Image (cartoon, coloured by chain):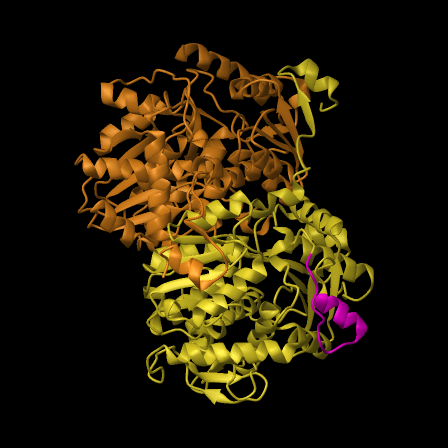
Chain colours: A orange, B yellow
Amino acid sequence: MRKMRRKGLASMAAQTAASTTDSTTVDLGPAAALSCRECGHRVPLGPVFACEECFGPLEIAYDFSAYEPEDLRKRIEAGPANIWRYAPLLPVPADVADKPNINPGWTKLVKADNLARELGVTGGLYVKDDSGNPTHSFKDRVVAQALEAARVFGFTTLSCSSTGNLAGAVGAAAARAGFRSCVFIPHDLEQGKVVMAAIYGGELVGIEGNYDDVNRFCSELIGDPAGEGWGFVNVNLRPYYAEGSKTLAYEICEQLGWKLPDQLVIPIASGSQLTKIDKGLQELIKLGLVEDRPYKIFGAQAEGCSPVSVAYKAGHDVVRPQKPNTIAKSLAIGNPADGPYVLDIARRTGGAVEDVNDEQVVEAIKLLARTEGIFAETAGGVTVGVTKKLVENGVLDPSLTTVVLNTGDGLKTLDAVAGTGLTATIRPNLESFREAGLA
Amino acid sequence: MRKMRRKGLASMAAQTAASTTDSTTVDLGPAAALSCRECGHRVPLGPVFACEECFGPLEIAYDFSAYEPEDLRKRIEAGPANIWRYAPLLPVPADVADKPNINPGWTKLVKADNLARELGVTGGLYVKDDSGNPTHSFKDRVVAQALEAARVFGFTTLSCSSTGNLAGAVGAAAARAGFRSCVFIPHDLEQGKVVMAAIYGGELVGIEGNYDDVNRFCSELIGDPAGEGWGFVNVNLRPYYAEGSKTLAYEICEQLGWKLPDQLVIPIASGSQLTKIDKGLQELIKLGLVEDRPYKIFGAQAEGCSPVSVAYKAGHDVVRPQKPNTIAKSLAIGNPADGPYVLDIARRTGGAVEDVNDEQVVEAIKLLARTEGIFAETAGGVTVGVTKKLVENGVLDPSLTTVVLNTGDGLKTLDAVAGTGLTATIRPNLESFREAGLA
C-alpha cells in the first residue's frame, strides 16, 4: 500500500518539474538543494516533492557553513517579531521581510503555572499558543513559507486541499501577496469554515465528495495543463511548506532563553509538524545556538484517529491507516504521511505517542481555558489532554520543563464545546441575583 | 438628561469608595491621582470613577517628571513584546510584566499597500490590527489594565456588563490571574459569544432584559453589599480600564519609527478609545518621544448607531442618544459617554466624524480581506468603510500617512458576512473543473 502511494507521488513529481522553468538559479537563501529523506539523493531546488530514485519525500538541504553562533544569535534577536527573524535558517530570500506576506509567528510562550498546579507539573510548564497567528492557526507558518517558494518558482495561483485552517491561511496569504488563490474543500463543510475561507475573495471550490476525493482531484490537477502555474502549498510546494514548522522549535528555544525544553507535547495530523520541530531542534544544536542535551518528543492524537499512537503502542514501525471519527477534525488524517518518522523520533528521543478520547479533549479545552485563559481548538484539547494522561501514567516527568503546543483557535471549533453556556439566568434585580445564589 | 446620568454616577462612586480600604498608599507606578476631566478636582487613587464635586468623569493624572526622552525610549524598546513595554506610562506597578495577566498588545501595524491602491491613498496607509490580541479584540488592552487595578485595590472578583468582546476578555484575564469572574450579559445573545464567554469557567449570568437592563443591574450591584470585593472593569475600575487604549497610540507611533501619523481613523462606541488615543499621542509629544506636529483624528460610526456623527455634522456640542440598529454590535452604544469629548477632539485636530451603512460595512470587511488578508469584525468594516468615504468626499487627505484601526475579529461576527461562500461546486474530476470555467 505504502509503495503504491509513493509511486503515484513520484509520477506526479516528474510531471510537475517538467512544467516549470530551470530551478538551479533560484534564490532561497541558505536552501541548497532538495534531498531525499530515505536515500539522500539530491536534486536542485524546484517544485518537486518526491524522490525520482526511491519515491521518498524530498526535504530542504541547507548550507549553514558560514554561520558563527554568536553572530547568528544577534542577527536573529535583531530581526522582526515574526518568523522572518529566522530567515537565515529558512528556504527564503534574505530580503523576505520586505515582501508582502502575512508574517506569522513570534506567538506567545505562556508560562502556565495554574495548569501546572492542576496537572502536578513542577519543572515548568509552557503553552506555545499559535492561536495568535494572523488567521489563528499554525498553518500561517507553513503557508508563509510556501508563498515565498511560489513567488520564486513563478507560480501565480496559490492552491490547496483543506478542511478548514489551511484554507483560511492560503486565502489570506494569497490576498496580501497579490496571488490568485483557488482552494478546494469538501462541498458540505460547516458554514463558519466556509465563510472564513471565502472572505479573502479567492476561488473557493466545493468538491462533491469527501476530503480524500478532494485530495485525489488536486493530484490530478497538478499533472494536468490546467494546473500549470499553480502552487499547491501542501503538494508540489510541500518541501518548502513543511519547513515552516521548524520556526516553532526556534521560537520555543529562543523564548526559553536559548535553551532546549526537556519535553515537548506535539499534535500529530500528517506528522510533518512533529518531524520538522525535531529537525529545528537538531539544527539549533548543530549551529551551537543551544546546548546539546537530551529532549523528549511526545506525539498526541485523538483516539478517533490514532494510527500513530496505535502503532507506537504495538511496537510497529509502520502505520496502519484508520477511518477518522473524532471531533479533532484538524488532526483527522487517517493515513499520516510522516507517521513512520514520528515513531522513529518518539522512540529515539525517549518520548511516546498517546491518545485521548473526545470527552477528554473537551475536558482539556475547558481545563486550559479555566486555568490560563487560552481558548484552544480541539487540537489543543488533544495535546493538553495527552499531557495530563502522560503525567498520570508516569510517562511524562513532571519535574522537567515541558512545552505543550496549542496549534489553533477555539473560535473555529465552537461546536465541540457547544454545551458550554450560562451558569444562571436571572431577572435584572438584586433579589433575583440573591435567589440564584450568586451573592 | 446628561445631568441626571451624572448624578447617578456620583452617588455610585461614593458608595464604591466607602466599601474599600484606604487607597492613598497604592502602588500604580506613575499614576499619581485621579483628576476630574471637567473641573480638575483631584482625589487619591481608588476604585471611583465620577467626580464628587461636579459629577464629571475621573481619569488618571500621572507624574512623568522624572523621565528623560532618550532613556525612556530605550527602556520601552528593551521591554516585552506586549503593552507592558509601556509600563512607565501606565497606571500599573513597575513589576507588572511578572504578574499573571493575558499580556495583550504589540499587535501588527500592517502596511496596507493593496488597500491604499484601491482607495487612492498615496501617503502610506496602515491597518493597526488588534485581532491579534489574546481574545482577538482590543478589549484585552483595557481589561489587562483593569485587572492590575483590581489586584492593587484588593478585589477578588472581576466583573462587567457586556454583549460579547468584553465578556471574553474579562473571562480570560480573570482565569489566568486566579480571580473569580462574574460576567453579565443579555440572556439571548448569539450562541458563539456565549460559548466564548463561558469557556473560561467563570460565572456567566444571563439577564432577562436588554443591554440597558444589564447595565442598570450592574450599577445597582455596585452599590449593594453583595457587590463588595467586585471590580467592574467598565464601571468602578473605568479610569484604569480606559487607559489601556493609550497603548494603541504608543504602539502606532513606535511602529512608525517614533513618528506621529498624519491621520487616524478610529471607531466610536462609548468614544473612550478615541479620547484615550488622543491622550496617548499628547503624552508622547510632551515627553519628547515624537516630534510635535499636527495630526487629525477621524471618528467612525455605523449609520444605524451614529449619535456622534449626527452631532458632528449638525455642529452640535452635545450628543442626542439613539436606539441602535446596526450589524456593528460592538459599536452599538446609543448614548456614548465620551461623545462630547470626541466632538471636541475631531474639531480641534481638524478631523471629522463620519458613518457608513450596514451594506458599506460588509463591503469594507470584504475589501480589507481581499486586499490585505485581514478578516475584521464589523467594527473594522466601519473604520475601513468610513476611510473610503472620507477619501471619496475629499475630507481625508490621501497624500498623508493614515492609520486605520481594526479592533476585532471577523470570526466573532460571522453572521454579518454569512452570504459569503463557495464560488463553485464541482464533481471531483478535471472535466467538471473545466466546465465550471476554472481552468
Residue B278 is situated, as x and y percent measured from the top left of the image, at 60, 74
Task: Tell me, yes or no, whether the highlighted magenta stretch contains residue B258.
Answer: no
Span highlighted in magenta in the image: B307-324
Please state which of residues B159 and A138 is positioned toward the viewer in this rendering: B159
Q: Quadrant of the N terminus of chain A?
A: top left
- Examine the rendering and report whether any part of residue A254 can be seen: no
The vertical placement of B102 against B191, above or below, is below
Using the image as rendered, state which of residue A149 and residue A323 is in the foreground. Answer: A323
Q: Is residue A184 visible?
A: yes
A51 lies above or below B250: above
Q: Is residue B42 left or right of residue B23?
A: right
User: Residue at image x 55%, y 48%?
Assistant: B188
Residue B233 image point, x, y percent: 46, 66
The residue closer to the viewer here, B10 or B407, is B10
Q: Quadrant of the C terminus of chain A?
A: bottom left
Give residue A402's position: percent from left, percent from top: 26, 45
Q: Identify the residue shown where x is 45% and y is 13%.
A: A5
Nearest the viewer among B245 and A262 is B245
The vertical placement of A223 against B57, above or below, is above
Marker count (numbered): 0
Residue B322 included in the magenta stretch of the image:
yes
Describe residue B2's horizontal placement relative to residue A271 as left or right. Answer: right
- Name the residue: 60% across, 42% down: A172
Q: Position of residue B50 (x, y in %)?
A: 51, 80
